[in-house]
Amino acid sequence: MTLLDRLSTGWKAWIILFLLTFGAAAPGVFLLPALDRDESRFAQASKEMLEENNYIVIQYQDELRNKKPAGIHWLQAASTALTTGPGAKEVWTYRVPSWLGAALGTLACFWAGIALVGRRAAFLGSAMFGATLLLTSEAHISKTDGVLVFLTTLGIGALGRLYLGTDKPGRMAFLVWLTVSASFLIKGPVTMMVVAYAGLGAFVWARADEGKGGDWWRPLADWKGPALFVAMVLPWFLWIQAATDGQYIEGAVGKDLKDKFTGASEGHAGWFLYHLSHVPAWFFPATLLFVTGLVASVKQVAGAGGLNTAPVRRYGLAGAAIFAVLVLLNYGLALVPPFESGGVAETLRTLKPLPAWPFLFIAAIWLMARETPAARGPSDETKGLRLLLAWSLLTYAFFELMPTLLSHYILPAYPAFGLLCGYGAVRIMDGARLPVSNTVGAVLFVVGAGLLLAASFPGVTTYLMAEAAGDFKTVSAQEVLAAWTPYRDFPLWLWWAGFGLSGFCLVEFARGRVAAAILLGVLASVALGWHVRIFMLPSQVWVQPTETARLALEDVCGIPGEDDVCNVKTPARILALGYAEPSYVLTLGTQNLHPPQTPLDLPLDPAAYPVVYLLNFEDRKADEPMTETAARLRAEAVRLGACLTESPSYYALNYSNGDPVHFRAWRFDWGGCP
């Protein structure tokens, strides 16, 4: 028994894989500040559930957040209640569900892979997936994707066992429905879609090649599964509809979901092959075997009779024709004049039909394939690869063709790609020769490692500082750069470790020692990830505007609730002018005001003091320059006899919108200055 066999069997494999993702992401969970904007919005909505003891309505301060279901907020609220309570303003408590979800996603990948590609390939593939930059990054962001990838992968693992044949079909079907139902409460129909693509793709593939898709899917049609879905999903949807006067579905479906299919929602467009172009960095270190896994699996399926030349040509032409029609329809609809009445007709006019291509392609193959008496069925190995290829490629095609493009959307396909990489690794270890694929994989690995090493080197941050400093209008670039000097350097020993491990990985891969190369690649990914999460990002306060604002507020004892720290009374809330990022609300307090709610006059009631303003002198969206607003506040303080305490200037770049910020905190106390 080889070392790989010993590691991939028994409890050791599960612990190793869990700790891999869990440990790789851990520094980011605790050391990184709250990110803008989605993470802080999710966490703040969960925080308000705890503060108001209302677990039905999702809101961000006074605004209803009718976008995603409540499931992730329940998990975040629960993790915070169990750790620190709602009074804490630390974001890490809201990251725990994503952290655990990503680590469990690696285990779910292993469990799915055991059935689909065998234990050795599953262990290698899930290790590579568990170390990918995208998964370990989503693990420390308090959003939906960490939990989503776990539920999706677990559901497809159960689907795979149904497809290959199991002595417990009822349990596996129930598990599929359980994951689909739970995931629907996390991020709507994403898991349902991915599971459907995997299952339908495998079924139609079998129908096209063996003449019959089989009846393995019948347990999914049992009434218990749909009943479970209704029981888990319907009650909350009825409650939220009633609580929001019918606004939830209008916002979640009629606005949020519709916008993603009618254009680049919130400006999130992208270039051609957007998701594929992110593979070298996001899929690192599994990029080493990305091409090898795809080629090896396709060869295996083709060698088993799954890719006969005539059907492939026929189905390929059908897919190309469907794609061409959708492209014409996509641009043709854009030429139709808008409907003044709006409604369904206007919605249909603005829809982008390209994401329908995977479904229509499957439907075309189904209709073109003649159902005949089944030929001798393929091996379980070939069937497992069919399911993995359907899962990965159809999911990829759907998200690649969406008009709204965000790089993390593709995460549900990454476990399948990881397992294919594991399969390719085992094939090489068993003697298969794939020199071209291996060379391309090595090039992708070098590109990914090069990008990560370059992006995390101090010279890059210094260059970006110089670029950002030139955007300030209220202060010279030299003064800004002088203030940012402490952020220029950070320890590099983990950077050098990642560099060396990446090099040794390539050397071992070239020598044909694939298992050793995978181990070194995984360690390189962990080292580079730790470098970024422990040293680089936490030190870059110049791109953390809320943390920069905190520094200004601390200078005037202006953070609510910190009376003991300052030994003076702190304000009940902060009044921000020119700054309204969600991380400000999350980490400094729900009660804090931001534009346009911030009052522009000092109160007349002495009991309302101290009053603290956070002023952004680089604000270019206000009705009047910040200098005029500040001058008026100063004049009011003189008239009322209030004491004004000012912080020094603090500078940062708001990465959410690319704007510079120039903060000063002003504290007003009733009565004259001592």
Image (cartoon, rainbow, N blue to C red):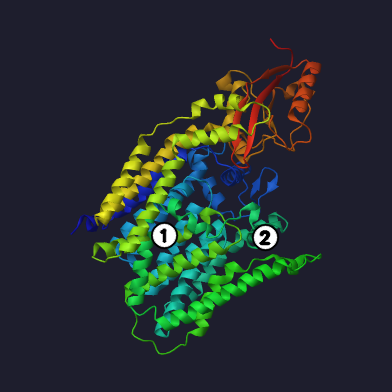
Residue assigned mark 1 = 415
Residue 511 visible, this orientation: yes
The numbered mark at residue 249 is 2
- The quadrant the C terminus occupies is top right
Q: Quadrant of residue 671?
A: top right
Badge 2 crowding class, 10 Å Cα cut-off, few under 14, some 14 to 19, many 20 or more, is some
Indicate the secondary structure of the residue bearing disc 1: helix
Q: Quadrant of residue 567?
A: top right
Residue furthest toward the bottom?
373
Number of numbered labels in the structure image: 2
Q: Is 381 on the left-hand or right-hand side of 264?
A: left
Q: Are marks 1 and 2 in contact (CB under 8 Å)?
A: no
List x then y, in percent, for residue 384.
Answer: 36, 70
List x then y, in percent, for residue 672.
Answer: 73, 12
Badge 1 crowding class, 10 Å Cα cut-off, few under 14, some 14 to 19, many 20 or more, is many
Nearer-the-camera pick, 442 or 400:
442
Q: Is residue 662 above or below residue 193?
A: above
Name the residue: 52% across, 37% down.
33
List x then y, in percent, for residue 612.
Answer: 68, 25
Nearer-the-camera pick, 532 or 94:
532
Q: Is 207 on the left-hand or right-hand side of 671?
A: left
Name the residue: 75% across, 25% down.
630
- Spatial distance from mark 1 to mark 2, Cα to Cα? 31 Å
Q: Is residue 519 above or below residue 421?
A: above
Residue furthest toward the top?
674
Residue 549 visible, this orientation: no
Name the residue: 59% across, 47% down.
38
Q: Is 122 on the left-hand or right-hand side of 182?
A: left
Q: Is 656 on the left-hand or right-hand side of 305?
A: right
Amino acid type of the residue that numbered disc 2 sits on in the rendered structure: Ile
